[in-house]
Amino acid sequence: MRNERATVDSGIRAAATISKAWPYEEARKIIKRWPDGKTAKNGTAEPILFETGYGPSGLPHIGTFNEVLRTTMVRRAYEELTGNSTRLIAFSDDMDGLRKVPDNIPNPDLLAANLGKPLSRIPDPFGTHDSFAAHNNATLRSFLDRFGFDYEFVSSTDVYMAGGFDDALKQVLRHWDEILGVMLPTLRDERRLTYSPVLPVSPTTGRVLQVPVTVVDANAGTIAFTDEDGTPVTQSALGGKSKLQWKVDWAMRWVALGVDYEMAGKDLIDSTIQSGKIARILGARPPEGFSYEMFLDEKGEKISKSKGNGLTLDQWLDYGSEESLAFFAYREPRKAKSLHIGVIPRAVDDYLQFRGNYHAQPIEQQLGNPVHHIHGGKVPDSVLPLTYGLLLNLASLPGVGDKATAWKFVQRYAPGTAPDTDPELDTLIGLAVNYARDFVAPTLQRREPTDTERAALTELDAELAKLAPDTPGDIIQNLVFEIGKHHDFESLRHWFQALYETLLGSSQGPRMGSFIALYGVENTRKLIAEALSLADA
């Protein structure tokens, strides 16, 4: 995913200018914003600034990764279209106060004792970092680094404490009434009573307070409020002694950092609207961006950091490739998608299929192919001899539950391949073995064939006995088709379903010709014999 800028062919640039692929459509918004490129007040060129935000109140999940990935795709598309320089900031709102204890965190009592304090000032329940935020920030950076993202990590706490937001914070104090005019109509009556754009940090407890605040001196950055123990306090709002309320903070960040593009989930549409209004009050133009739909779990519920109901990056990568995850994230960003273990096999094979088609496509189709955006235009031209689905069926069979054994079947099917010379295939086999072991093999249950199926299986066995061991899969597939036509099946689909259910123990399965060629004619005949023995029992 590394953002390696290079000279873009004029033909590619021309095609990208009219491409309907969503990263190019998003990039054209930025071009419209800065037709001649972004310039500073002194006239010098500046890079376009992309931003992604993360709240480290829980462990980062694939949804977090997804936002960085999609933003990177828009960033690349913009560079292809313009050749202009860009930057990407991964911003952590670690100055936020912890509101509730996540469900998937150890030592919950430690967090409960520190509710309300900035995430960066709460002890790490994992015991590995200086704070809870530091632990979650490190986790975020680790998986962004694993994918080779080109980004600059920025901690909200660091910027607040160093005074980097002080000027913008003073602007918030100067425009206090205007900002309240935006926010108060959006709040419930009881919330309006205590709402303040600025959240002071208590000088006694260290908690981020949700209390009414009075501006004492906007130019000096001084505010007044009542502390938790009822003591009146007048103190500076600068230098980390306060932080801004979420929607105001988002707007202030856009203004202070000069953000040009930031996407957000559909659940933040209202926040985007209000923050945009506040950014204009502060004298700046809100960034470009779009609202993407959320990932859902198997129950159709939104994935949440605090619930821990989403897949982790490591869970996906135990069973699927990095590219397959990027492929899943790329497609249909405005459509809600279920994200769970069961989607991985399809994502892997769809990615490989789109990659296999890429190099034969005209440029217009290439630019709309997800793999162009996954690989930044540098798409591998290698083609694997097997699909992930086919390997799953192989690895799910008794006696083939380990990588070394699976390789023996693969090498007979695809002579000349080997783990050391075909590392991508080796990885794919290992992933399929993992998935088959954990999710497929435990669920398989072969059923007894019906009389019609028994007759067809008997004929298939007789015909397979006539074949050479190295008969190609296409020939075997035609043979299977013809046998199905000889028997009284409602349709050929029912014949193949019978093969899956009686031989493999599953309602779905691979292209049978390819499977038999991979598993071996004699081994397949043994499966048939076992199925027929069930009918005889």
Image: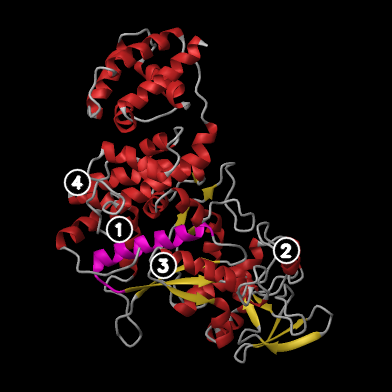
Q: Amino acid at mark 4?
A: Gln
State yes or no: discs 3 and 4 in contact (Cβ < 8 Å). no
Q: Earlier in the sequence, mark 2 or mark 3?
A: 2
- Range of residues picked out in magenta: 61-85
Q: Position of residue 180 (x, y in %)?
A: 64, 72
Give whichever of discs 4 and 2 has the lower sequence position: 2
> Which three-letter amino acid code belongs to the residue tagged 2?
Pro
Marks 1 and 3, Cα distance to the nearest angstrom? 21 Å
Residue 111 is drawn in which quadrant?
A: bottom right
Q: Which mark is residue 108?
A: 2
Give the mark toward the camera: 2 or 3. 2
Three-letter amino acid code at disc 3?
Answer: Tyr
State the residue lying farthest toward the right. 230
Q: Residue at x 30, y 11 (%)?
A: 485
The residue sitting at 77% across, 70% down in the picture is: 113
Q: Which residue is mark 4?
A: 361
Q: Earlier in the sequence, mark 1 or mark 2?
A: 2
Sequence-wise first label, 1 or 4? 4
The quadrant holding residue 459 is top left
Question: Which residue is tagged 3?
Answer: 261
Q: Which labelled disc corresponds to residue 375? A: 1
Specify the principal SS of the magenta part. helix
Residue 386 visible in rendering: no
Structural distance between the alpha carbons of marks 1 and 4:
16 Å
